[in-house]
Image: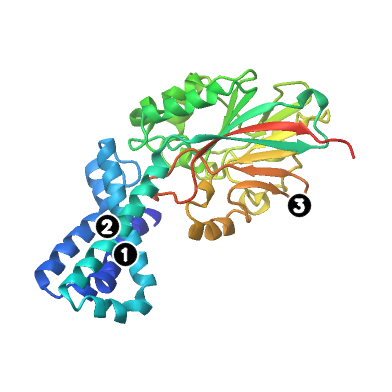
Amino acid sequence: MFRIFFNIAPFGFALAAMLFFVKTAEKKPRRQAVWAAVLLLCAAKFVCFQALGGDSFAPELPEKLIWAWNWAYSGMCILCGMSVVMLPLRPLARKLCASPKGRAVYLVAIPLAAWGAAAAGVWNGIKVPEVVEMELEFENLPPSLDGYRIVHIADIHASAAARMWRTEAIVGRANALEADLVCLTGDFSDGLSADQAVNVRPLGALRARDGVFAVTGNHEYYFDISGWTAFYRSLGIRFLENSCVFPRPGLAVAGVPDPACMQKMWLVPDPDRAFASATNGEFRVLLQHRPFVDYAQACGIAALEKCDLQLSGHTHGGVAPLMASLVKKFNGGMVRGVYKGADGRTVFVSSGAGQWAGFPIRFFDDPEIVLVTLRRAAEK
């Protein structure tokens, strides 16, 4: 159903653009036909990806061809949105288009704005993420962990549209931070392991004093979870599946798989079980792909046992300002940055290091690699 919607919906956007934008200015059938052909070609992105590249969201096609089609598709969607927003101004637009010069301005300025914005949005989704540094204070942090540095990377989404060069750049920037710990919170890749392993392999070069640990995201289960699991293990990345490690005395790092695992595997996410071995008052860090999960409803188990810091991704920072409110609604009111949970948890939600091909643009929402430094709060 999800794929069917993404295949069909863009043609509705193209029709809206024709009705609200093209017909306002173009009266000649031949010119309307040219516009219709262009818009339909843009709208056919997912259908053509499936036909030519084998998958709507992870096609095996040349990288720059995918970028170009993502740009064309995104521009068409933005043009549709602009056309709908401008509906109250349609009488003025018709008046402007009454003269050849005015019509030319209308037919150039608006598409230029739409596809110009699309170019910026697509580039923002594929550019190499910058490092963002932040400090988080905790009253119960053991003195020995004051200044402990964690690199948090979420949502890389390596694919034919974000190839090995980009993953290498992410790894290079992460390793340059010389952190104590590297935590990966899911959605590493889109596609089959046989096709995309080469683009993900640089993750095996990630280094930190206390190791590299990860949890799965929902996209791990959309394609080839068994193949990917074996591949990541061969890279030396340890996945925490309802389990806990103790990188330093006084520090417990636990992880749970994404709830999407219940549709593909016997595994059930269980944070209480993950922290079962942390019984000596350790500072608890939970790796969880989604910032909010109602475990009682989704998994039929008890509510999340208290942790001190939760690292998550999944939201892509809301993607764009108007989208952020919708993303918040489905993620417990969290979209990016630091939040305080009702149980005292500090939740940090990364905007992610990459972008999913199904929605290939980001506006005012840069991809990021995050360096979190733990600080012991001064006594009051």
- Rendered image quadrant of residue 374: top right
Q: How is the image coloured?
A: rainbow
Query: x%, y% of residue 257?
Result: 58, 38
Closer to the camera, 135 or 324?
A: 135
User: Residue at horizontal 25%, vertical 68%?
Assistant: 106
Please say whether residue 9 is visible from this viewpoint. no
Is label 2 in contact with label 1 (beta carbons under 8 Å)? yes
Residue at 27% over, 57% down? 43
Q: Which disc number belongs to residue 254?
A: none
| Residue at 22% over, 72% down | 102
Residue 125 position within the rendered picture, expressed as x and y whole percent measured from the top left? 41, 43
Query: Does residue 49 lie above or below 168 as drawn?
Result: below
Name which residue type carries label 3.
Ala
Q: Is residue 149 left or right of residue 223?
A: right
How far separated are the C-alphas under marks 2 and 1? Answer: 8 Å
First in residue order: circle 2 vs circle 3: 2
Is 148 or 333 nearer to us in this picture? Answer: 148
The residue labelled by disc 1 is 13
Question: Mark 2 near mark 3, Cβ–Cβ under 8 Å?
Answer: no
In space, the residues marked 2 and 3 are separated at their CA atoms by 43 Å
Q: Label 1 amino acid? A: Phe
Residue 330 picture location, percent across and down: 57, 56
Q: Foreground: 229 or 11?
A: 11
- Residue 43 shows which numbered tag? 2
Q: Residue furthest left?
A: 30
Indicate the position of residue 128 as horizontal and vertical percent values.
43, 34
For the point 29% across and 63% down, the residue is 110
Q: Residue furthest front?
A: 101
Return the residue at label 3: 342
